[in-house]
Image (tube, grey):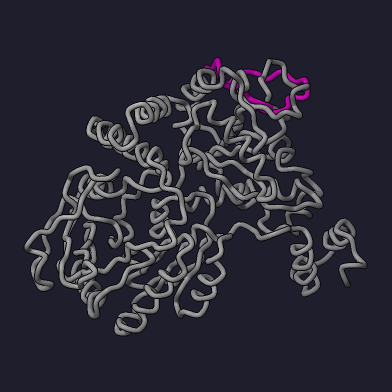
Amino acid sequence: MSGNTWTVGGLINVLKQVDRSSPFYEQATRMLDRRLVKGSLPATPPTMEPRRLTIGMCTFDDFDGVYFSLQAIRLYHPEVLDRVNFLVIDNNPTGAHSSHVRTLCEQVPDCYYFPYRSHVSTAVRDLLFRISTSDFVLSMDCHVLFPPGVLARLLDYMDANPDTDDLLQGPLVYDDCTSVASHFEPVWSRGMWGRWGNDPRAKEPDAEPFEILMQGLGVFACRREAWPGFNRKFGCFGGEEGYIHERVRRAGGRALCLPFFRWLHRFGRPGGVPYPLPHRERFRNYLLIAHELGLDPGPAVDHFRHCMGTTAADEVLEHVNQELVGPFTFFDGIYCINLDRQPERWKSVQEHLRRVGLKFMGNVRRFPAVDTPENHHIGCALSHRAIIEEARWQGLRNVLVLEDDVRFSPLALPELAASLRELEARSWDLLYLGGTRWGRTYPLAPGCRHLEIPIGLTCTHAIAYNHTVYDSLLADLPARPSEMAIWLETHRGIDQYYASSFKGEILLVRPPVATQPNLKAHETRSFVLE
């Protein structure tokens, strides 16, 4: 059966009648998968063999750093290799370095590679703890070297303290291989909270561990089940130092300096840093921290007024304050589905979303859509499914999924806020922010003025999923393109499935606050569509 003698529809009709356990079915679905999808499917986290310690690193176009860090551990720490595995998260898997990083990981025993594009941030290190199945996780920048014996001593410490809730760190070793920095001093410096400092107790590697306020996060380790996690809304770079240490303390642990746990960090970047480091995004992270931990944001405001200028900093402050009281904070994550081949649509929707208060890179995660040119319904359903799966393994309580032609009403913020206030007191599975009614009038949910119970509503340009529905949807929605194509022979589209077959608590905001340009004729209220 060659590509010139079969059609997608014809093969689907054959597969509907074939035993799914047969070799023919498996071979034919593989052919159909390749035919349907242009590009690659979203990756799922690897299934890792648990060890005592996972050594993880996140990278963005830094093959050299990954190479030398991994190989140095293998060459100079062979005594630990039977007790550790490696996890590399590639935060730019379409970049020039990615194929080399992937190939390296395939060559290194017990090394797992995970391409991740939905969210670009140094806080992606949180995923090391969510993917690993080991007892402990060591997060290291992908350009760090350890002196011989350090990792063996760390494992000994973990063996002696198997239930510790502490954050484990050690002294940074400078390039002279003699001077060290044991911690961060709590001062503002060049757009960061924290400046390198040295406690004399860190001079000798055999000295006793001691508590610190905070330290740079080029290297840190924690028992996986004690890890408190980063704020889900952080974007880009900055803010984690000091913040995670305080979260550990509030959870009953300590931030420790283990003097033997020494590490050398490459700071020089002759080719420049390949990812954006805008002050406005970093300032936003610090404001989110102050809000979450109940801290005075004043020192951060003063510092960034100095770094950015008063006007620019005050604009960020105003926007973040509006964000914190706005309705979109209700959602643990906001994703927007966009095809790689349509960057102009991503640019357009970003501009539109800024008008409803989503003004920062950390507000909305761009999800690279599954591209199925022969039938876009397949790619749409697979994209929604992949986001639901990601939300589940990341532990998001709920997730709002937007499509890249979504448009919000001028009164979306106050109207959505009214609906969400009612939603907080109810159980729910799916929440629509808009959709096509097909002329129907829907009843209000019991006791509500701003939530309706829709019947037969279609379109998924703005739909939220609660954690209560992740498992059932992932069981119902096929993961493979070929099987999704067969499934759609019955359901036609994921929105049609929700409208006619889904058994769960579905609600619609009243009035609807989101639409698409091609739905304007179906709307009963005015939307401003640029």
Instruction: Left or right? Give the position of 187 relative to 488.
Output: left
Say which quarter of the image contains residue 11.
bottom right
Residue drawn at x 67%, y 19% is 527
Instruction: Quadrant for the N terminus, please.
Output: bottom right
Q: Looking at this rendering, what residue extends furthest in the right direction? A: 5
Say which quarter of the image contains residue 133.
bottom left
Residue 67: where, in percent of width, then height? 43, 74
In front: 126, or 275? 275
Residue 13: where, in percent of width, then height? 87, 58
Q: Is residue 480 above or below residue 469?
A: below
Instruction: Left or right? Give the position of 279 relative to 188.
Output: right
Q: Looking at this rendering, what residue extends furthest in the front direction? A: 270
Residue 445: where, in percent of width, then height? 58, 21
Name the main secondary structure of what is drawn in magenta: loop
Say which quarter of the image contains residue 526.
top right
Task: Verify whether residue 437 appears in magenta.
Answer: yes
Let me know if residue 469 appears in the view. yes
In front: 33, or 171? 171
In front: 488, or 229? 229
**Stretch in magenta:** 434-454
Residue 98: where, in percent of width, then height? 54, 66
Count of labels shown?
0
In front: 156, or 62? 62
Q: Is residue 225 above or below residue 63?
A: above
Instruction: Left or right? Give the position of 326 relative to 152.
Output: right
Q: Is residue 277 above or below residue 127?
A: above
Instruction: Left or right? Give the position of 308 relative to 371.
Output: left
Residue drawn at x 63%, y 22% is 512
Let me know if residue 253 appears in the view. no
Residue drawn at x 57%, y 21% is 451
